[in-house]
Image (cartoon, helix red, strand yellow):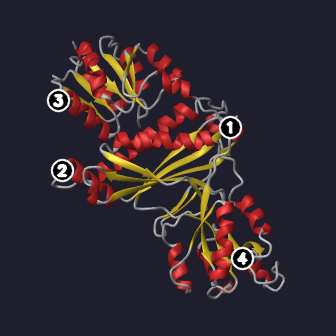
Amino acid sequence: MNTQASLVSKVLVLEESGEHLIALKAFCESAGLIGIRPQNGDDASVLSILDSNVDLGGILLSEYFGTGIQLARQIHNSRPELPIFLRRENCGDLSDIPDCDRMIFRCVYTLSDLQPLQTTLEHSLFYRVYPSQLVRGISELTRSALESTFRGCRIEQEPPYLVKDRIIYGELFTLISIDSNWCRGYMMLQTSEADIKTLITHRDGHEEGVGFRDINNLLGEATNMVWGAFKNRFATRMHHENSLMRIQVPIIINHGRNYISFGSDDPQLCFKYTLWDENNPEIGSVTIHQRFVFNLAWSPEEFDDDRTVDALVSSGELELF
Amino acid sequence: MAQIIVIDDSSTVRNEVCDFLKANGLTVTSAVDGRDGLDKIRADSALKLAVCDVNMPNMDGLTMAEKVRNDLKNASLHIIMLTTENSPAMKERGKAAGIKGWIVKPFNGSAVISSIKKLVG
């Protein structure tokens, strides 16, 4: 029987009072949230954070933080995919808020009653069941692929998390479709071209530097290896539906805003890996964001971890026919 | 004349495999996909071994292998697939096309070089 993976999600906590922060901190820890606070409390600083790669799952906003409702409006206009959970001082509803602003908020809660927040988080962020074997397996096979693609690198990894964010990290990302009898969607790897260039140039001693096409190919090959391993382990049974009849939706990319949408509001399953050259750690690291977007089909009850196929032949060895 | 052709759309893999085989005293050429590979195999009857990816644009590796046997009527070229694929169905299709062997990426040259040298003769 598959157990459910324990996942976390980052939330931007916009609270004006230390006392309230302490109360929310305890809640976040119990609810699987990692709270992030802005250094400055002005609206511009908050909006600036939203333009960076924080990989958020939502926003906990106090009605008295910054300009309050006005800030919420700006956040919603800028990033409508991020759910805003509004904390009010006394009233647990939105009856005194103009109608046009009510739809901005996913829920309203007070510190004396956190149940609405808990319930809404479960429905808007943590509602999908991700099998532990899947989450652990993705980490294992990705680390193996990265180790063979970026030889001589040490790989560190953050705990897997869920995001609602649609901001693309770095300039370089790959996208490949995932298709099986229990899930359909995409996998992305996102990274910074400059960081990979520095790493490879130092590692391989290329005095003239490495071309961007070489870097593209390197990330492409890493993607291919992760995809192949995923397929061999988790997608061994294909559905028999006619491929021409399968549903597709447009993927929308806005280059100017580093934004990508798969047409679904579902949270994305994310992994973050940091690569260090073991012999030259001083040259800096490469961060690779891996995102799974199961936007076309998701039936985890059909999930199957087929390691037997993997075990037949060790990678890299020749199986003679 | 080259003994081996490495066919892969990834220049990273092409370069890695070609460099390794050359370092082991073999003469090597390369192609960027199945269609390019088929053209080069057609043009060079001295080739003894093809190391070929499966998933490639324009023409996949299994289709190329089938065309080598059926269209070019070349039964002497040994073909080894080097791929992330590991499905029994694909391997069966490969066997039917007369493929000699299957390597699941990543390429571990030291583990396969003696077999490759035997195939090349």
Q: Which numbered marker is on residue A86?
A: 4
Which dot, 1 or 3, sits closer to the camera? 1
Task: Estimate the spatial distance between the alpha carbons at disc 2 and disc 4, rounded to whole Å.
Answer: 53 Å
Q: Residue at x 42, y 19 (%)?
A: B66
At label 2, the amino acid type is Gly
Q: CA distance from mark 4 to mark 3?
A: 65 Å
Judged from the image, the secondary structure of the residue bearing numbered disc 1 is loop
Which one is in front in this view, the residue at disc 4 or the one at disc 1? 1
Disc 3 target residue: B23
Q: To which residue does mark 2 refer?
A: A205
Q: Position of residue A292 (x, y in %)?
A: 56, 49
Q: Secondary structure at mark 2?
A: loop
Q: Give me the residue at 81% from left, 80% from top.
A: A94
Could you classify mark 1 by the number of other residues whose Cα lies within 10 Å: few (under 14), some (14-19), or many (20 or more)?
Answer: some
Classify residue A39 as left or right of residue A16.
left
Residue A299, by quadrant, is top right
Q: Secondary structure at mark 3?
A: helix
In whole angstroms, how far apart are the C-alphas of marks 1 and 3?
47 Å
Q: Which mark is residue A2?
A: 1
B85 in relation to A262, above or below: above
